[in-house]
Image (cartoon, grey):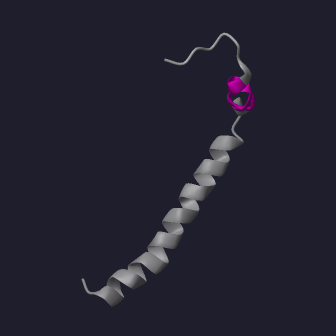
Amino acid sequence: MNYDQMRHFADSYGLVFMGIVFLCLVGWTFRRGARRDLDRAATMIFDEDRQDG
């Protein structure tokens, strides 16, 4: 496989792959039940009872 063939492959299928990954990550964020997990992650730094180490 030479450079031009690899470049064509990356331009076409790489874009499709990155689009699918993006849609999966957005879908994961807005899935049902995600609000509880995301709220907990957003306020985790303020938890008094959590100890590191």
Residue 46: x %, y % from top left: 73, 22
The answer to whether 51 is drawn above or below residue 20 in the figure is above
The answer to whether 49 is drawn above or below residue 42 in the figure is above
Q: How many marks?
A: 0
In the image, residue 42 lies in the stretch drawn in magenta: yes
Q: Is residue 30 left or right of residue 53?
A: right
In front of the other: 48 or 33 = 48
Q: Is residue 44 left or right of residue 1?
A: right
In the image, residue 6 lies in the stretch drawn in magenta: no
Residue 3: x %, y % from top left: 31, 87
Q: Residue furthest toward the left?
A: 1
Residue 42: x %, y % from top left: 72, 31
Write the residue at 39% across / 79% down: 9
Is residue 35 visible in the rendered image? The answer is yes
Q: Quadrant of residue 29?
A: top right
The answer to whether 37 is drawn above or below residue 23 in the figure is above
**Magenta part mainly helix, strand or loop?**
helix
Q: Residue furthest toward the bottom?
A: 4
The answer to whether 6 is drawn above or below residue 29 in the figure is below
Residue 50: x %, y % from top left: 62, 14
Is residue 40 visible in the rendered image? The answer is no
Write the residue at 54% across / 18% down: 52
Q: Which residues are magenta?
A: 35-45
Tell me the quarter of the image containing the N terminus: bottom left
In front of the other: 1 or 43 = 43
Q: Is residue 53 left or right of residue 2?
A: right
Write the residue at 74% across / 26% down: 43
Write the residue at 60% across / 57% down: 22
